[in-house]
Image: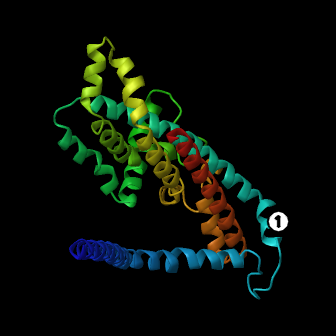
């Protein structure tokens, strides 16, 4: 009897010890996990500090300045916003920027996808990838010089057009818009093609082979297998191309100066001219408006993407 009681007591003690060990293991695991999370934090901290110092704090200050006067920094309410929306140059810059983005994005995405799909079947794809990045390596000033050689009044292309009696293309007429569009597409085409190629190459070839075995052709494989699997790549390319469309000021400025033809007078020109005139209040108000538009556009794209994923 006593032996049975001793055995039962020993079993209870062992069970209690096992439970205690399990709790201790969970506690140690939790501590280890917390330490691991802190290790990741030390890598994120420098980037977070950079974003805070160079982006977040300046934007907060710009938001404050948008409600203040230029010199005295006194609160002026929405006067700066009323002034910029009543400014004809601001409305022209908004219209041209939206037009430029609306034209360039579909052209760049469509052309780059066609080229990427054609190149995806080639064997020497690694060499082609290196060549595609070449336009990104060319400095903006060098690229603008090439465009001036081609499209100036006495340039090669205008010389050919003039010799055939066709209208020439200049930086100071209504065709300047298409010169800027061509410059943007040329510079960003190779990089965008490379992104499409990365997405296409990540799709398993077994899917297309199985579909072809069942009688599907190239067109059906493209529309029902390849394109649906490229939605994440499309989202990335759209965001990057949209943001890059706001960075064409250097090309437009070097091509035609601070006051180009009205068809390529973009928001960046307006900001540059306001900066030269030290109209900081109007600059701050306009920057808040532009940030709001970009934030809403990116948020809508993300919402559409999340909806497609679900």
Q: Quadrant of residue 195?
A: top left
Q: Is residue 82 left or right of residue 5?
A: right
In this view, 251 is above or below 184: below
The image position of residue 41, as x and y in percent, is 39, 76
The image position of residue 48, as x and y in percent, is 45, 75
Q: Residues within 10 Å of mark 1 (few under 14, many from 20)?
A: few
Q: Seen from this angle, which residue lies furthest top? A: 215
Q: Is residue 38 visible?
A: yes
Here the colouring is rainbow
The image position of residue 44, as x and y in percent, is 39, 74
Q: Is residue 160 visible?
A: no
Q: Seen from this angle, which residue lies furthest front? A: 1
Callout 1: helix, strand or loop? helix
Residue drawn at the location 74% of the way across and 81% of the way down: 70
Residue drawn at the location 33% of the way across and 31% of the way down: 117
In this view, 143 is above or below 304: below
Q: Quadrant of the N terminus?
A: bottom left
| Residue under pointer 1 | 82
Q: Is residue 39 left or right of residue 130?
A: right
Q: Quadrant of residue 75?
A: bottom right
Residue drawn at the location 31% of the way across and 39% of the way down: 197
Q: Quadrant of residue 31?
A: bottom left
Residue placed most toward the observer, 268 or 66: 66
Residue drawn at the location 67% of the way across and 55% of the way down: 93
The image position of residue 29, as x and y in percent, is 32, 73
């Amino acid at each position: 009897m006593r032996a049975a009681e001793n055995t039962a007591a020993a079993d209870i003690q062992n069970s209690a010890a096992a439970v205690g060990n399990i709790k201790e293991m969970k506690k140690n695991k939790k501590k280890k996990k917390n330490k691991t999370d802190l290790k990741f934090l030390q890598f994120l901290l420098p980037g977070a500090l950079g974003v805070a110092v160079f982006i977040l704090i300046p934007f907060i200050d710009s938001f404050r300045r948008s409600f203040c006067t230029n010199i005295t920094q006194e609160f002026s309410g929405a006067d700066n916003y009323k002034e910029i929306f009543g400014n004809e140059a601001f409305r022209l810059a908004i219209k041209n920027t939206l037009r430029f983005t609306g034209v360039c994005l579909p052209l760049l995405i469509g052309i780059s996808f066609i080229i990427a799909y054609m190149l995806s079947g080639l064997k020497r794809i690694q060499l082609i990838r290196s060549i595609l990045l070449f336009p990104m390596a060319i400095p903006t000033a060098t690229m603008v010089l090439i465009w001036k050689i081609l499209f100036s009044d006495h340039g090669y292309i205008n010389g050919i057009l003039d010799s055939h009696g066709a209208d020439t293309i200049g930086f100071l007429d209504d065709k300047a818009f298409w010169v800027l569009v061509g410059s943007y597409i040329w510079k960003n085409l190779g990089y965008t093609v490379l992104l499409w190629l990365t997405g296409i190459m990540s799709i398993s070839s077994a899917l297309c082979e199985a579909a072809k075995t069942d009688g599907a052709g190239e067109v059906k494989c493209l529309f029902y297998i390849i394109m649906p699997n490229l939605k994440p790549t499309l989202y990335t390319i759209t965001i990057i191309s949209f943001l890059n469309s706001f960075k064409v000021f250097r090309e437009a400025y070097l091509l035609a100066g601070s006051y180009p033809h009205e068809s390529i007078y973009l928001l960046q020109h307006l900001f540059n001219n306001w900066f030269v005139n030290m109209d900081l209040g109007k600059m701050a108000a306009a920057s808040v408006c532009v940030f709001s538009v970009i934030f809403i556009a990116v948020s809508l794209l993300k919402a559409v993407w999340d909806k497609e994923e679900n």
